[in-house]
Structures are given as C-alpha cells and as structure tokens.
Image (cartoon, grey):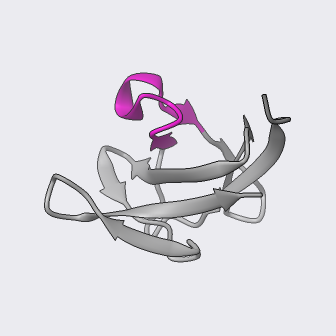
Amino acid sequence: MARKKKVAFKFTAPTAAQEVKLAGNFTGWEQGAIVMKHARSGEWKADVSLEPGEYQYKFIADGSWLNDPAAEQQIGNDQGTTNSVRFVR
C-alpha cells in the first residue's frame, strides 16, 4: 500500500460564498464532501490525505458545482460537464 500524502486544495469563490465543499471520487462525491475552511486571504482551503494516484474533483460553492481553474487538467464526466483532476505523486 502506497503512503498517503497531505494534499492542499485551495479555491477562490467567484462571489462571496457562505459555504464551499470539496467533492470528488475520493469522497464519494457529494455524500462525503469535505467542508472547506475560509481563510483571511479570501481563499477556501482543505487538506486531504491521499495515496498516489489520479483524482477527479469539484468544488460546491453554495450549492453550485464549480471546477478548479488551477487544476492540472479537466476531464469529461458522465454528466456532460467536466471534472478537475489532481495527480498525487
């Protein structure tokens, strides 16, 4: 089993969001979404321990599903939209 690494996710909501969650194939999507912390800088942050691999994710800002503009890659999904991709090495 590969060793887990602490991976930082950061997001700047396009408007003044009240709540931002991180959802992906590592959380069971919305069911296990991680509530992100709002930093003084205005960014929303969450640290997640992940094994090396490829992970798809999105942010949920006040109920709206949004991609990460800083993601390494975007990939099509079965909803007809795209997911952000993070590679953990």
Rendered position, 1 above or below 62: above
Look at the image and say whether residue 29 sits in the magenta stretch: yes
Residue at 47% from the left image edge and 24% from the top image edge: 32
Relative to 82, 39 lies left or right: right
Residue at 57% from the left image edge and 54% from the top image edge: 54
Whether residue 80 can be seen here? yes
Whether residue 19 can be seen here? no
Find the residue positioned furthest to the top: 31
Total labels drawn: 0
Find the residue positioned furthest to the left: 80
Task: List x then y, in percent, for residue 12.
Answer: 58, 67
Task: List x then y, in percent, for residue 63.
Answer: 30, 44
Residue at 46% from the left image edge and 42% from the top image edge: 24
Query: What is the quadrant of the C terminus in the image?
Result: bottom right
Task: List x then y, in percent, for residue 45.
Answer: 70, 50
Question: Which region is colored magenta?
Answer: 19-35
Task: Residue 70: name its quadrant.
Answer: bottom right
Relative to 86, 81 lies left or right: left
Task: Residue 30: name its quadrant.
Answer: top left
Task: Residue 76: name its quadrant.
Answer: bottom left
Rendered position, 6 above or below 72: above
Q: Nearer the viewer, residue 13 or 33?
A: 33
Query: What is the quadrant of the N terminus in the image?
Result: top right
Q: Nearer the viewer, residue 23 or 53?
A: 53
Rendered position, 20 above or below 49: below
Residue at 56% from the left image edge and 71% from the top image edge: 71
Task: List x then y, in percent, for residue 19.
Answer: 49, 42
Rendered position, 53 above or below 67: above
Look at the image and say whether residue 16 sits in the magenta stretch: no
